[in-house]
Image (tube, helix red, strand yellow):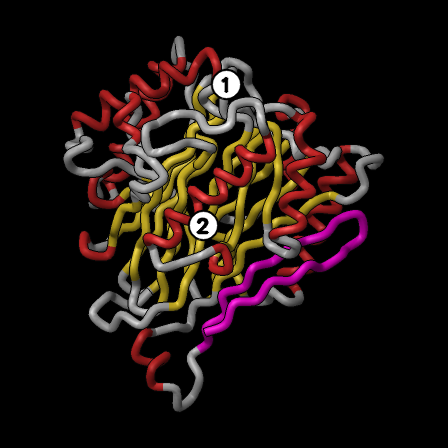
Amino acid sequence: MDKKQQTIQFENAYATIFQFDCPVTEGDTSQSKNGTEVCEYHVMIHASSPKCSYTQQLEAVLGAYGQLIEGPLHGAQAVFKRYFLSDAANQADEVIVADVTDCAKSIIQQPPLDGTKIALWAWLMTNVQTGVSKSGLYEVRHGAFRHLWNGSAHNMAANSEYQTRLLFNEYNMQLIQEGCTLEANCIRTWFFVNDVDLNYGGMVRARNQFFFTQGLTAGTHFIASTGIGGRQQDPNVLSQMDNYAIAGVRKEQIHYLYAPTHLNRTSDYGVSFERGTLVNYADRRHVFISGTASINNKGEVMYPKDIVRQTRRMWENVEALLAEADCNFNDVAEMVVYLRDPADYALVSELYQARFPEKPYVIVHAPVCRPGWLIEMECMAVKTVDLPTMPVF
C-alpha cells in the first residue's frame, strides 16, 4: 500500500490531497487476501483569490473538485463532504443548489482564516456503492459493511439542550431502522454550537443524559467527538450534528484511545466523549482523533494566553493519541484546526506550514468550548495493517 500527498493548483483554487492507494496487484497474495481494492482520498480544497466574489470562489472550489474527479481521482466517489463558510446565512443556499453529489454534506459557518469565503473537505473512496438508506442516512457499501453518514442535522427546539436531545432521539431511531445501536455502531460525532460560550452547556447536558440511557458511561465507553463553535444558516439552530456509524462492525474491531500520560478522561470534567477511536480492518486502520486542545492529564488548560505553546502542546497530545494507535502524523489524512481569535491565524499558519507543508488541513474561526483554549484540532489517520483475523474492508 502507498500513501501520497500532493498539492494541485487550479484557476482561483488549490487542493491538497492525501491518497491511501491500495490496489489489488496480480500475484500479491498478501493484498488479495485482505481485499485491498478500495483506495481512499482526503482532499482539502481552498479558494485562492480572496478578492473574488463568493459565487466566484464557490465556482472555483467546485470546478477544482470536478477536475479532480475527472483526473487524478477518477473512479472515486465522495462519501462525506464538509463546507466551511464565512457567512452561512448568505452562502449556504448556493452550496445546496450547486453541489448535487450524492453523499452526506455538512455545511457550517466556520470562516476559513486565509481571507477567503469557502473551503471544502471531501473524503472519497473507490469501488464502493453509495445511496440513501431507508432511514435517510447516507450509505456507503463495501464488503460486509455499510458506512452510515449524516450531515447538518438540526431542529428548531427551544434551546441547545432540547435541540440536542431531539437530534439524538432522531438519530437513535435512524440507527434502529438500520439494525444498529448508538453504543455498538456509532464511531464519530460532531456538534457545532451557535454561540458556544452560551450554549455548549445545554448540548453537554443533553448528550450526558442521552448517553446514560443508552449504556454509554465512563465505565463502558463514549464516542469520539468534536464540540465546537459553528453557526448554521438559520440563527435559531443552536446545535447542529454530523455523525458516522458502521453497520456490521464487530466489537473487537473498535478500540478507544486515552493517552493517560497527556490527557485525562473527559468525564472528569463532566463531558462524555472519547479522546480518540480506532477501527481495525484486515488491511487498514482508521483512526478518529476528537477535538484536542492544550490540556494536561489533570484536565487543566496548559499555557494560557500563549498560542505558540498551546499549539505545540496540542500537537504533543495528538501525537500521544496517535501513538496509542501505532500511528504518527505521517499517517494523518486530514486536519481541521479551530482558532478562537482570528488574530492568531498568521502565527498558527506559519507553524502548520513549517511542519505540515502538503498535509490537507484548513484553519477556521471557531471558538473552543473553554475560553482558555485558544486552539483545537481534530484529525483522521489511515494506516496499513495486516490483520487477517479482522474482517475485510
Residue located farthest toward the top when viewing the structure as drawn? 158
Depth check: 276 or 152 in front? Answer: 276
Q: Residues within 10 Å of mark 1 (few under 14, many from 20)?
A: some
| Badge number at residue 143 | none
Q: Is residue 323 left or right of residue 85?
A: left
Marks 2/1: CA distance? 25 Å
* Residue found farthest to the bottom: 27
Query: Toward the viewer: 187 or 276?
Result: 276
Q: Nearer the viewer, residue 54 or 275?
A: 275
Q: Which residue is mark 1?
A: 371
In which quadrant of the rendered view does residue 252 lie? bottom left
Of labels 2 and 1, earlier in sequence is 1
> Looking at the image, do the residues carrying marks 2 and 1 touch, with CB atoms under 8 Å apart?
no
Q: Where is residue 371 drawn, in percent x and y?
A: 50, 18
Q: Position of residue 81 (x, y in %)?
A: 53, 45
Q: Position of residue 299 (x, y in %)?
A: 35, 27
For the residue carrying disc 2, how many other residues have a C-alpha within 10 Å: few (<14), some (14-19), or many (20+)? many
User: For the magenta stretch, what is the residue range?
Assistant: 1-23
Picture residue at 46% right of the left edge, 11% below the top: 198
Left or right of 117? Residue 42 is left
Q: Nearer the viewer, residue 135 or 182?
A: 182
Q: Quadrant of the C terminus?
A: bottom left
Label 1: state its secondary structure. Answer: loop
Q: Amino acid at mark 1?
A: Pro
